[in-house]
Image (cartoon, grey):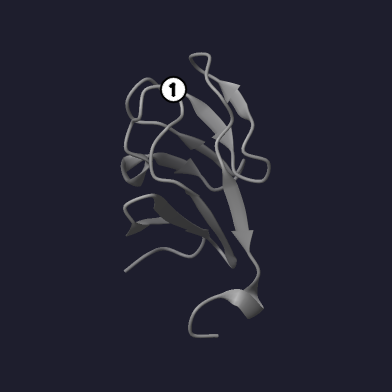
Amino acid sequence: MTVAGEPVVRQVSEREVAITVGEREFRIAAECPHRKGRLVHAHVNPRTLRVTCPLHKSVFDLATGCRVAGPVSGDLPVTEVVPEHRPGT
């Protein structure tokens, strides 16, 4: 059971992780661009919509994919899934 607004992070394929925060769903790369940390284990801040890699603590904005803190790396590929394109809706 999840609390309303509590992020849900799940692996959807070898290369992709889904993050659901409230009514919003994002698809991100499964690995951090810095040192390939597994983002299925990432911390998600539901208030700021930022995801933190568990390996070296790089922080990315879920809305843009831009790195906002942590070791120098590229941005994180992010796609927001619009409701009419979600499986099962």
Residue 26 figure quarter: bottom right
Tell me the crowding category of disc 1: few under 14, some 14 to 19, or many 20 or more residues within 10 angstroms, Cα based.
some
Q: Residue at x 38, y 49 (%)?
A: 15
The image quadrant where one finds the C terminus is bottom right
Image coords of residue 11 (percent x, y): 33, 56
**Residue, far front:** 15
The residue drawn where x is 34% and y is 46% is 40
Q: Is residue 21 above or below residue 33?
A: below
59 in relation to 39, above or below: above
For the question of whether residue 3 can be seen, the reply is yes
Residue 84 sits in which quadrant?
A: bottom right
Label 1 residue SS: loop
Does residue 7 appear in the picture of this structure? Answer: no
- Tally the numbered discs: 1
- Residue 66 rendering spot, x and y as whole percentages: 64, 32
As drawn, which residue projects farthest toward the bottom?
A: 89
The type of residue carrying mark 1 is: His
Q: Residue at x 47, y 24 (%)?
A: 58
State the residue position of label 1: 34
Q: Residue at x 59, y 68 (%)?
A: 23
Q: Is residue 47 left or right of residue 40?
A: right
Q: Is residue 18 above or below residue 46?
A: below
Q: The N terminus is located in which quarter?
A: bottom left
Q: How far from the left and from the top, in percent, is residue 43?
A: 40, 39
Name the side, left or right, on which 62 lies relative to 20: right
| Residue 88 image position (x, y, % from top left) | 48, 85
